[in-house]
Image (spheres, grey):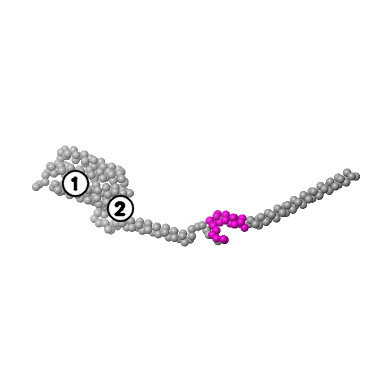
Amino acid sequence: MIACTMQGHSIAVVMMMVCTAIATMSHAEAFGSSMSTGTRMLWAPQMKLRHQKRQNSAFGMEPVSGKQMQRRTISPLHMANTESEEEAAKSVALQSLQDDLKQRVVLDESEIPSLLVPYAKKLDELTGGWALQYADLSPATETSPQGVAFLATNAAYAWVGLILGIQGEFLLGGLVELAGAVSFWYHWSQLKYGTNRMEVRLALLTDYLTAGAALITGVLYCFTMGIQTLPLDVVLTGAAAIFCLGLSWVWEFGMPYLFWHSLWHIFSAMTGYLVGQAHLTTYPPMS
């Protein structure tokens, strides 16, 4: 009986302890929930502000003062100014290009003396356009160092013509002088205007005429004096001139042409001088 009573008390005590533990856990959970809610309520503004800052940073926004925000982008006024500056720069570049084109104006056929135009067209028909083709010397121009040096080689003709004229060889000296002047005109036009220009083609045709006249006169002098009596230096310089002319036709572009055709000017002028000297020796001018 006593054992049953003690057993009943033990069960009652255990049940009371279990109930107490459950009640304690419930109160603790409620307290924790209330604390969590309070903490969230306390930190909500700060969390919201941090979240807003992250969004602003992602979209290029930053707080200025309080709730005011500004975008980290170029203002429309600044963009308009930049576009205006770019348009102004383009306008200046376009105007500069137009001015350059005006300086390199293409002469219309109506502005070119009609005396040579029919002959140029006829020569084109006979040769299929080959005879009046000429080298593209770009990027050299009439004012570039290589262009100026190339044009300066025509001075050899002027020097030879002057010396022969002073010595009394007026015919060959005058033709060499004229050929040098026309050669300068042709190559100056070639450097200035570029390819496929009528004014350059007409200058080339004129160069053929004057250079051909000087060349034919020199050959006639040689036959008159006798080929077998020609000095060796005449033959060597003449061969060197023809060799350089041929190479300038092979490499008919840019610097190779400038180099080899410059040598043609020098050696051909030297050949003319030697032929003139030989002719003066064989047929001295009448005093």
Q: Label 1 amino acid? A: Val
Question: Residue 133, can we see it?
Answer: no
Secondary-structure class at tag 2: helix
| Viewer-nearest residue: 91 or 127 | 91
Decide: is 171 above or below 80.
above
The kind of residue on which mark 2 rests is Tyr
Residue that numbered label 2 is attached to: 193
Q: Which mark is residue 247?
A: none
Report x, y in % for residue 77: 47, 61
Question: For residue 271, what is the image quadrant?
Answer: top left
Q: Residue at x 19, y 44 (%)?
A: 272
Residue where numbered disc 1 is placed: 160
The structure residue drawn at horizontal position 26% and vertical position 52%, both measured from the top left corner, is 202
Secondary structure character of the magenta stretch overall: helix
Tell me, yes or no, whether the highlighted magenta stretch contains residue 46. Answer: yes
Range shown magenta: 45-67
Direction from residue 246 to residue 12 in the image, left or right: right
Residue farthest to the left, as pictured: 287
